[in-house]
Amino acid sequence: MMRQVNVAVLGAGTVGGGVVDAIRRNGRLMASRLGIELGVHRLVVRDTRKRRDFDTNGAKVGADWREAVVDPRTDIVVELVGGTTTAREMVLAALQAGKPVVTANKALLSAHGEELFAAAREGGANLYYEASVAGGIPIIKVMREALIGNRVTAAYGILNGTCNYILTRMRAEGAEFETVLKDAQRLGYAEADPSLDVDGIDALHKAGILASLAHGFWVDVKKVAAEGIRGVTPLDMDFSGRLGYTIKLLAAIKLEAPKAPARGGKAAKAGASGLRISVTVCPTLVPNHHVLASVSDVFNAVFVRGDIVGDTLYYGRGAGRNATASSVLSDLADAALDLRCGERQRLPPFVPHEEFGALMAPGDVVSSHYLRLSVTDKPGVLARIAAILAKEQIGISSVIQPEGHEGASVPLIFMLHHATRSAVDRALKSIRRLPVVTGEPALFRVETFE
Amino acid sequence: MMRQVNVAVLGAGTVGGGVVDAIRRNGRLMASRLGIELGVHRLVVRDTRKRRDFDTNGAKVGADWREAVVDPRTDIVVELVGGTTTAREMVLAALQAGKPVVTANKALLSAHGEELFAAAREGGANLYYEASVAGGIPIIKVMREALIGNRVTAAYGILNGTCNYILTRMRAEGAEFETVLKDAQRLGYAEADPSLDVDGIDALHKAGILASLAHGFWVDVKKVAAEGIRGVTPLDMDFSGRLGYTIKLLAAIKLEAPKAPARGGKAAKAGASGLRISVTVCPTLVPNHHVLASVSDVFNAVFVRGDIVGDTLYYGRGAGRNATASSVLSDLADAALDLRCGERQRLPPFVPHEEFGALMAPGDVVSSHYLRLSVTDKPGVLARIAAILAKEQIGISSVIQPEGHEGASVPLIFMLHHATRSAVDRALKSIRRLPVVTGEPALFRVETFE
């Protein structure tokens, strides 16, 4: 028997239009695979008089989202308006009405995830959010279903297409960040205000969601400072290339060794008896031979290491009308199947199962680093910098003072051995104070994936 | 409420042991995520006296599989004995008893898929087979669930880890096929009789399953001749490298343009009104910049192009105890959830939805080719070969007669423009007849992913 499911789509922007259009194009194919027909019976828009660049395909177009949500014929609600205010009201209203919700809104999940998950529990409805992380890549399904038998020991993500596009072109053309950013803006790959993307905030939101799913406690990334790509120069691309690396904006989620048991206190208890994970988002040197290094342009990828499956990678378009629509369709199919089978929460949107999980303080995270300084070219400079690094117990694995940079100040590049970020920051603070150090130092992580 | 589900594991070999071991290690983690406890209550082995290299973890160990299947306490049956005889009986018996079955057996699915799917339908039980294709890569779930809203226009797979390991080392070391094969056998990456792997048969089985899932009709690959990697030489690796390519054993599944309507006949009808797809498995030149070129060693990857999502890639270990176990655990979780929700076939194992789908005759498949000949070094040779190619309307995009190959016979390499395989085969037949052509020609596909 074929069953009809009515979908109310809230928001007719890029993604909303993409979803309506995709259902028009492939709705019959989906129905033949699912045994369920998905129909968009309501489309909620801000301005009903505005002309659409897509066929609304018989949906009733209106401006009143509450009406669409409470409409008894509405089986599933799709929130695609973005933002964290109206979107939050929409999702809460639908869940409270016991209606399953599909959303692509990572900012909303990042800011109000726990509230929404609770509302889903109480409303007895489910919340689906495949499209919220890495666009067309089914990473949420992979984390929750495909890898359900695995403890995720590490996950690395190229989660922002704008940054990856900019870095890819900087590397290929030796171009400056600002130049490529302007192109990206012209091409629609970057917003007029690009900070959410290029400062790593968007990637951090996504990393927080992935970390929470992987480790079973809600990871609040507010405590993590994302580092964006504004500080990456052609010089850094050049040198990291010579050293055998590519620079990517990489989100790293790692299962760290438990803290040594300390006396009392929840934190100590957490560290001792629970998981300890680290989350970082910053420009990172990735070895050229690693599969993540070959992820170019606007593409995203997530590299997941499971204790059973080993290394896996998932790659695709991280944003855009169609890639996002594809993930929304996948969620709609799951929601429709769950409705048919009468289980409102076959898989709850989030299962907190690590009571004592804890996010490591950024300063305690250990890694190798790439440090580029601009110094006055005179004797003794290297010695003074080396002394400061030695004082913080930071080993130097290599130093490059490149040829052909004559003049008042020359670049000096250090590859630093494993050290805590706080040690590196302390050293950097002293190094900055040296009168021979001119201009802003660049500090990036070096990832070996071991 | 926590629910207990009893699993009977049939087969205690590499994968069977891996599954029992993985459930022992991560069973509690899975239970905390699922709300269902998976317990292996029966383990069926060939020889009950044999010592196991894994903890059977309280399972009742016996040799009688029928007893384990009919045991009323058995909720889910996992078939891991391999082969197509006893395995077939086991799966049929379980499905007929209305018990969900999880299998990793691609040979069985390839040979008896339609029979098993019918038995599942009749028995009202479900058949799960994530582990049957590409080991730890959740490609079955991706094809059936994540990409459900997409028409798959093309899919390319590196589906055999043994071949990929051999080709990777041949390229890195300039080594001969036979030399690396012996190493692979010593390291356990290749069987004593390697033909199933190196002749492309295993990859073809997997390609058939993927093609069937992608296109909604059962693709019988018996009509396709897999071409293995025995004919790949260090010379080919060297030249394809110089031309900017890497040689991979690639399975290509393409949605082809519909055939021009012909007069009557089911075939014509199929071609005209239904899908036409091509499936090929052979050594293929992949551009170095393409992400599939960076898939090395024993790793597998599947590159899927959807009409909505665009290009996506899924990468991981294609075989081995643990990678395969991870996929079995994912299937067990789905099976357990389906049991709890009381839907015996939330997603049927296979949904035939393309009545008029047809597999293109191998000879009709069009592609570019790499052709390496060994010829006697005398004037006029090139002219005679070029004439034969011209007669078959096959354009030549480049010819290389490398330096430093003096002697009776020298290598001669052609890059051929798009042509049907039958045209190329006809040309090759005439070329072979030329007295100046010595030794066996090598013919590989060239894939541009356009």
Image (spheres, coloured by chain):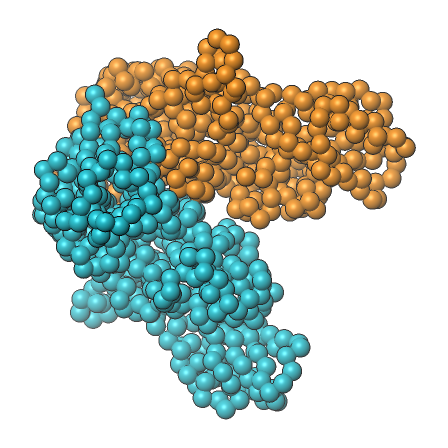
Chain colours: A cyan, B orange
Relative to A293, is B165 above or below? above
Q: How many numbered marks does the figure carry?
A: 0
Q: Is residue A218 visible?
A: no
In the image, what residue occupies the spot 54% across and 39% down? B450
Q: Can you give x and y, in whole percent of width and height, for residue B136 in the image?
A: 41, 39
Q: Nearer the viewer, residue B294 or B25?
A: B294
Q: Please state if A202 lies on the left or on the right of B420 as rendered.
A: left
Q: Please state if B1 lies on the left or on the right of B363 as rendered.
A: left
In the image, what residue occupies the spot 70% across and 28% down? B394
Residue B286 placement: quadrant: top right
Q: Can you give x and y, in whole percent of width and height, for residue A132 in the image?
A: 30, 51
Q: Can you give x and y, in whole percent of width and height, for residue A308 in the image?
A: 37, 44
Q: Please state if B74 lies on the left or on the right of A195 as rendered.
A: left
In the image, what residue occupies the spot 53% across and 17% down? B223
Q: Nearer the viewer, residue A76 or B241?
A: A76
Q: Nearer the viewer, residue A433 or A3?
A: A3
Quadrant where the N terminus of chain B is found in the figure:
top left
Q: Is residue B374 visible?
A: yes
Residue A194 placement: quadrant: bottom left
Relative to B5, is A68 above or below? below
Q: Can you give x and y, in whole percent of width and height, for residue B437 in the image?
A: 81, 26
Query: What residue occupies the far bottom of the structure in this picture?
Result: A435
Relative to A333, is A3 above or below? above
In the image, what residue occupies the spot 41% across and 29% down? B214
